[in-house]
Image: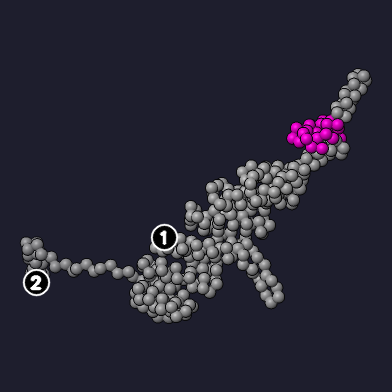
Amino acid sequence: MFSNRMLLVGGWLAAAVVLSTGVVHAKPAEPYVSTGKDHAWFSFSKPHAPDPAGQLAYAAELWSHQRFTKAFKAYRTLALTWPGSDEAATAQYMMGRILEQQKKWKDAFDAYQTLMDRYPGAFAYEEVLQRQFAIAKQEMNRKRGKFLLLPGYKAPEKAVELFEKIISNGPRTPIAPEAQFLIGQSYETSLDYELAMVAYMTTQQRYPASDYAEKAALGRARTLYKITREQPNDEASLEEAYAAAILFLNAYPDSDDADQVRDYRDNLFDRRVETAYSVAEYYDQIAKRPKAAMASYEKLIRAFPRSAQAEQARQRLEELSREQVETTDDEQTQD
């Protein structure tokens, strides 16, 4: 009991001395050290060096000696072990470079995309975007499935996702208009004309002052024309394609492609007239609905007053009008 009291008194005295002197011997603060991921002794991604700077130097040495597979593993280990270090961005960039060197285009693109997503501002942005763009164009034109004498095939639609990411990464960069235009080309080459038309129209709307606005307007007119070939009886498609041709010629009358678009316009005009006349003939000759036929003939005359079919429509309209009058007179006589 006595000893416990003595210990308590001693503690009070020590505290009093500290307070009276104002001296506290605290342990000095240690500098911040970037900590990395712990690796088990059997880990395949265990770093060669104890810190990111050393690991980067080791990976760079492997790269300089063109030992690309080992260099890739070393850079990947750095990025995994010290993801928050300054060296991690460089490692991620070099992973993309090595994958390019190995012609693993899609993997290289994804490595650069990880760089974009995780390390903004820590790398040469324009260079990486250009590398992604080159890879996307490579994927657009790459032949797949080549084997022995088989020539392989192209699948340009697989590049669409890459172009979309490039636009998302740099919507106001000089390459964005071309990337959007190439989305349209990718779809058109894949015979998906409706999506191609939408992509071309998006190019026109987003980048009207770019060098690709005229090309996109031509692409839209061309794909709409192709759609009418697939849907020859769709009046709405004919109208939209004709309007696109007119808009192109009004906007770019001196274009090198103006003659081609004039051919589209003239062909579409003739087909619109033929379609309108066919509708009127159907009501007239097959459905035997004279009032609907007369309305269709009148519509044709208003829309295409100088066409040959308009003259035929006028003659038939007069005949139907007389028949209607005669029918009315007969009904009144019977009454």
Q: Dot 2 surroundings within 10 Å: few (below 14), some, or many (20 or more)?
A: few
With respect to residue 173, does 270 lie above or below?
above
**Residue 42, quarter of the rendered image:** bottom left
Q: Quadrant of the N terminus?
A: bottom left
Colour theme: one colour
Q: Secondary structure at mark 1?
A: loop
Amino acid at dot 2: Ser
Horizontal side of 82 relative to 321 (left or right) equals: left
Amino acid at dot 1: Pro
Residue lying at 9% horizontally and 71% vertically, measured from the top left: 3
With respect to residue 220, does 8 lie above or below?
below
Q: Secondary structure at mark 2?
A: helix
Evaluate whether residue 198 shows in this view: no
Front residue (pair 303, 23): 303
Measuring from the top left, give residue 196's x and y in whole percent. 64, 53
Q: Please check the rendered image and state whether residue 300 is part of the magenta-colored stretch, yes or no.
A: yes
Taken as a whole, is the magenta stretch helix, strand or loop? Answer: helix
Evaluate whether residue 155 shows in this view: yes
Measuring from the top left, give residue 18's x and y in whole percent. 9, 64
* Residue 36 disc label: none
Instruction: From the image, tell me which residue sits under label 2.
Output: 3
Pair 1/2: label in front: 1
In the rendered structure, which segment of residues is drawn in magenta? 288-317
Instruction: From the image, tell me which residue sits under label 1.
Output: 120
**Residue 48, quarter of the rendered image:** bottom left
Q: Please check the rendered image and state whether residue 110 is part of the magenta-colored stretch, yes or no.
A: no
